[in-house]
């Protein structure tokens, strides 16, 4: 019996044992298998190990998605975590190719995956408060938000939690250096049942913008004159 002679239920079961790339390759055989590849129930969970994987056409985003994880463990993450105004031309060129990749992907998730319950981001330094706030607005069923080493995240994301996902149960902001102790405290006060983990975040030195340094210079000059 040829594979395409199996009924749809059996084909979906076969696809469920394959990884993303294998599903995509099999779907290219014919239109019938392409239809099985697009079956929403096959895609309740998506795990990515780099931003580059988000641009591949080996997955389907839809209402069935419940768990999403993007965890990038690479030496390049250190470069991404350097503030834009501090980057060298070489560092900026290394980030240009993927700077908006995760944010653009999260926008698609917010538009297509309203039933998302768990989001994990690690090493996604270019993700902004605006991207995460959009997820909080569009995914009201979110129960777990786990962020690690995401330097673009600030207290603005924490402030959006009570307004949009009051039923959030788990919040991790580990090694997110621009999250403050005050922001964490306010989030806990607004959501008493929220389990918060903030390893090193509020203890790390937050970044200072260039204009903040400029404002210090007149005072420094006065001290030097004295």
Image (spheres, grey):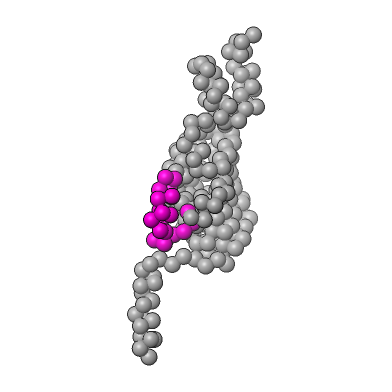
- The quarter of the picture where the N terminus appears is top right
Q: Is residue 144 above or below residue 23?
A: below
Residue 119 seen: no
Report the span colored magenta: 80-100
Q: Seen from this angle, which residue lies furthest front?
A: 90
Q: x and y percent of residue 162 in the render?
A: 52, 54
- The quarter of the picture where the C terminus appears is bottom left
Residue at image coords 36%, 68%: 211
Residue 38 seen: yes
Foreground of the two, 210 or 147: 210
Q: x and y percent of residue 70 in the render?
A: 55, 44
Q: Is residue 54 above or below residue 160?
A: above
Residue 92 falls within the magenta-colored stretch: yes
Foreground of the two, 25 or 191: 25
Quadrant position of residue 186: bottom right
Q: How many marks?
A: 0
Q: Seen from this angle, which residue lies furthest top?
A: 1
Q: x and y percent of residue 73 in the render?
A: 57, 49
Residue at image coords 39%, 86%: 223
In the shown orientation, is residue 70 left or right of residue 221?
right
């Amino acid at each position: 019996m040829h594979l395409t002679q199996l009924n749809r239920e059996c084909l979906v079961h076969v696809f469920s044992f394959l990884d993303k790339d294998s599903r995509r390759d099999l779907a290219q055989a014919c239109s019938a298998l392409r239809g099985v590849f697009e079956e929403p129930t096959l895609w309740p969970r998506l795990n990515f190990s780099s931003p580059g994987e988000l641009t591949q056409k080996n997955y389907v985003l839809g209402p069935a998605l419940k768990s999403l994880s993007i965890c990038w463990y690479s030496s390049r993450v250190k470069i991404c975590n350097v503030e834009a105004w501090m980057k060298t031309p070489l560092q900026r060129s290394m980030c240009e190719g993927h700077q908006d990749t995760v944010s653009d992907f999260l926008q698609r998730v917010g538009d297509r995956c309203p039933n998302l319950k768990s989001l994990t981001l690690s090493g996604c330094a270019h993700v902004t408060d605006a991207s995460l706030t959009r997820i909080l607005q569009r995914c009201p069923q979110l129960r777990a938000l786990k962020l690690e080493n995401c330097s673009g995240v600030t207290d603005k994301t924490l402030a959006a939690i009570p307004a949009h996902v009051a039923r959030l149960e788990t919040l991790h902001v580990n090694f997110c250096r621009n999250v403050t102790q005050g922001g964490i405290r306010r989030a806990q006060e607004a959501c008493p049942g929220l389990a918060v983990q903030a390893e090193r975040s509020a203890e790390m030195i937050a970044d200072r913008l260039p204009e903040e340094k400029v404002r210090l210079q007149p005072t420094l000059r006065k001290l030097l004159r004295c």
